Image (spheres, coloured by chain):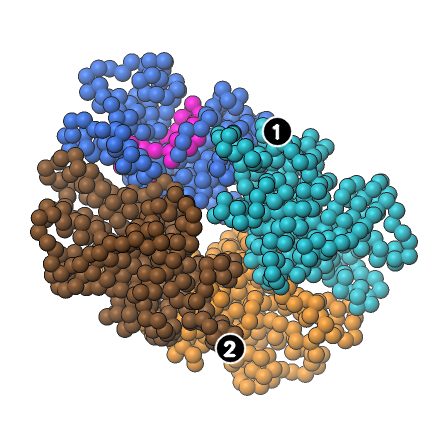
Chain colours: A blue, B brown, C orange, D cyan
């Protein structure tokens, strides 16, 4: 069977259902859906090893926020998106202690720039609290790290984060990265949060060593935005929908290798959604209104 | 029938042949193929109105250079590519008179940045010749124009170029832009030159008013690099290859709208090929070796 | 006598007064001072040829807004600065007709980037009004032009603007540029508006041909921010203050040539003030609140 | 006495000599001068505590390469500059073991961008050697780190480098940074190498905790380019040359605070010299010709 690439737990579950032809029940996985701030939020809980094996993702909680209507730019679309991301993150992370936010990916390559761009909207406070503890007593200490990419640093992101964490001693790490979706409709229209850590670069490149509690020694939360669809996956979906009985994976991969499908105006979309994620992280970590963030980050 | 999008005359001819099931002969069009500097070069001449109607492109000469092997980085791949582009251009343009090189497209959006990036490698000489005519007597006067995009300037590229041309009075205009291909294999692996002018933005956006001899009053040559495939065109090709009897264009366009297919490392590829085009233009216009260009442009 | 470089009419008047030892009255020049929105505004009117000769600037009105307190970031500092710039401009320009805003200078060189950066905050409406006249009926048509610099275009800014103006047919042109001040205290702390046009590049480079009603055929207004002090001028001022009886201009120019004095954090300051100027232009030209500009430009 | 700011050991020695009126001999310091590849090279050795106290810099070797003639662009100016930097570095560093190159400073602020820009020209090999040990057996393992600045990361450069070094385990660290000079003639015309480590940000900002063998546990070498002159230092020098008997430091610092003096075309100069330093590091660490570096880094 053709292996369809996705980083979204939601889609892994869909793929399982398709392959099982929706007849059986997926043991070890629970999914619930609701609306928050006008945006649909799906929670997929992978409960045990059966769920892990079925979906190919570790035990944990995965929240998928559907921001499709964000682009209609209706009343307070930005503020509502910030609050829904912020609220989802707040529900996952411990309420106290210093935080290290890691932006994974390559700023120079738009579909991979979600991590670095998000960091531009993060309120960095650790050094201020350290220098002026009284004035900044109301803030939670936050530092950030732009990991860069292996090809330009020579160092795996996981190595670099582990070294930095040993110095900064965060209570938790939030890792932000671009993801791959299986459906074009979810590209630049979805935010996934997870309490399971992340494997950097799965969105647009090779799998690298994981950032999670096992490798870093502290809880690692991840926030990702799908920015691309694997071209071979898209092609396979199209062929199946058209009634193709069997898709030759090898041939399809060969013809579509190194290709990705993205929105035409991906630059603007990635910039806007990265700001939503950055502000959402601020919302979850600091006691601030969005206008105050605007003022502090201008 | 599904309308497959391409800016390459070579592919327009292929599409005609496919639709005609290769049985009939395409009247009004002549195509020849040869190898130069190790790269295949196809020349398509649209000779009359029959050719125009069949291929949807104006009468003129279209040269397509296949740079697929460029990426194998074999001996002198860069120098050979510069020479083949330079030689092809030299064969099209008049040998004397001032030149205005126009970079169309949006620098901030990688697949659309071919034009602006190419200008970074152009030897700009007009002001030097004007200030120091004796010292720069061996150079041809070249000026450049970054047209920007309508959304950020409020002015059509064709309007802006017409105004500038009225002041600069070039003997010819060379317009550089990103194109759309129908085949993924040609993306970032092809350079097309034409003596027919260009319609800006056809590569990644809407058609705008043309840049050609009719609208600008001087001969307009175009150089383009395909950087994207229209996702709906790719999908239709895939479905046809898989044996789909009829492709529902409307449905396919709706599902794939505003999507494009690009290489994963498009940023680096566009940067490298834009340098080839810029140096190729210098090669055609000035009496310089590539090393001299390196020194002058560093 | 040492020639002190300044682009500010206010300082030209100060220099005249210093050289005249404040004993005589400056004929042909009128100066008045007031406070608006909490910022001091000085108006220098050069009334006739006597004033022109004394100050080395053409007859016209020069408004200097002192934004020194902007950097204290007190209540509504940004909004007040936008309104004071907007109000000053509104008092100079005709109330109707299409507008072309020209950003002079070099984006890649921070002290020269005021023009290009300002354009990033301009509401560009000409193409929208043209495409959807009914929906955008409340807006004034605005287009923008990034002139680039002679060394990278081969074309004088004045030539390029003249060509564009022949196509766009604006009722007025607003040219934005970086300036040189004579006092470090005014650098990144002043905005000058004038109804006399501008000589591009006088801030950080050589004088080029002027942009004014004579050369462009329509009224030209200028807005400038001093970003540098000429190092030789600063040195001469220091030496005079220290009691040096005679300053050897030639020697001082030789030792300080090609040097400029700028604030350490010029990048952030130029970015913030360019936004003030861009929003101020919007305020003068469109019927919009600052929050509406934020929404439209995000 | 006025404290003149400089990061160059060469200038610290000059200042000592000026204050001592050149009558006494500077104990604990040895200086020698020679020419290499056409560029003058001065070596200042601080031998003991007397030298440390006199010059305000730790015991060690400081090499200053005078690249003033680089800008005349005579034959092989670039290649010769690379070799003189490379040779100087090769004489200081141990011949074997993995290397971590740290680029200090702020890429977004030109006079502070020497570190990040230099890294763009470094051959990063650690990950390649690790993945393909046989193919890359001829290379020395090099990784790089862009430390960012405290205000945007919340983490001191020294902390971050210490954490990374614990993971990467380099045999030596090379830290690259912008410096402050006391003489405008040395700005963008000098490279200083030292085997004593570095205090980040002394070039354009506040002193932060040091990067040296004490704080990082491995030998730390530094390479710096002066990009600015402290405006107050320049002013004091000017006043003294003009015969001012006593310079009021407090007043001068107040009037010139937060100002720096830089070349007008600092952007291009910093870019070119950062490439010299990057290639010089490659020259010292790898067995490669400059042309091979060009090919590998293109």
Q: Residue at x 57, y 43 (%)?
A: D288
Name the chain letter of the residue that bears numbered label 1. Answer: D
Residue B84 visible at all: yes
The image quadrant that residue D4 belongs to is bottom right
Residue beneath label 2, please? B134
Measured as percent of width and height from the top left, residue D143 is found at 56, 36
Give the residues in magenta: A180-204
Residue A87 visible at all: no
From the image, give the main secondary structure of the stretch colored magenta: loop
The image quadrant that residue A269 belongs to is top left
Q: Are marks 1 and 2 on the same chain?
A: no
Q: Is residue A199 magenta?
A: yes
Residue beneath label 1, please? D169
| Residue found at the far bottom of this picture | C49
Q: Are marks 1 and 2 in contact (CB under 8 Å)?
A: no
Q: Nearer the viewer, residue B292 or D155?
A: B292
SS class, disc 1: loop
Q: Is residue D30 magenta?
A: no
For label 1, the crowd category at 10 Å Cα-Cα, with few meaning under 14, some 14 to 19 and many 20 or more, is some
Task: From this view, report whether residue A47 is shown above or below residue A96.
Answer: above
Measured as percent of width and height from the top left, residue C30 is found at 57, 79
Q: Nearer the viewer, residue A197 or D120?
A: D120
Q: Residue at x 58, y 61 (%)?
A: D265
**Quick check: A143 left or right of B158?**
right
């Amino acid at each position: 069977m053709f292996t369809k690439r996705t980083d979204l737990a939601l889609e892994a579950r869909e793929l399982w259902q398709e392959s099982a032809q929706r007849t059986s029940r997926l043991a070890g996985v629970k999914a619930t859906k609701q609306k928050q701030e006008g945006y649909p939020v799906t929670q997929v809980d992978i409960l045990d090893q059966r769920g892990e094996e079925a979906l190919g993702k570790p035990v944990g909680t995965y929240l998928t926020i559907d921001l499709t209507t964000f682009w209609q730019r209706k009343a307070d679309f930005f503020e509502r998106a910030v609050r829904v991301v912020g609220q989802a993150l707040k529900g996952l992370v411990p309420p106290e202690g210093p935080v290290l936010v890691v932006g994974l990916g390559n700023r120079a390559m738009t579909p991979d720039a979600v991590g670095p761009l998000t960091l531009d909207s993060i309120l960095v406070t650790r050094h201020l609290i350290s220098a002026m503890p009284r004035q900044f007593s109301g803030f939670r200490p936050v530092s950030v790290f732009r990991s860069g990419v292996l090809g330009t640093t020579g160092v795996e992101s996981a190595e670099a984060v582990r070294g930095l964490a040993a110095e900064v001693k965060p209570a938790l790490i939030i890792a932000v990265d671009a993801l791959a979706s299986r459906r074009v409709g979810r590209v630049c229209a979805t935010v996934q949060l997870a309490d399971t850590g992340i494997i950097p670069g799965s969105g647009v490149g090779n799998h690298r060593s994981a950032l999670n509690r096992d490798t870093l020694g502290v809880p690692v939360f991840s926030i990702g935005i799908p920015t691309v669809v694997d071209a071979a996956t898209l092609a396979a979906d199209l062929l199946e929908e058209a009634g193709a009985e069997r898709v030759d994976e090898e041939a399809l991969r060969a013809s579509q290798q190194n290709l990705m499908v993205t929105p035409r105006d991906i630059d603007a979309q990635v910039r806007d959604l990265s700001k939503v994620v950055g502000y959402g992280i601020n919302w979850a970590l600091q006691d601030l209104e969005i206008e105050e963030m605007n003022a502090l980050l201008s």
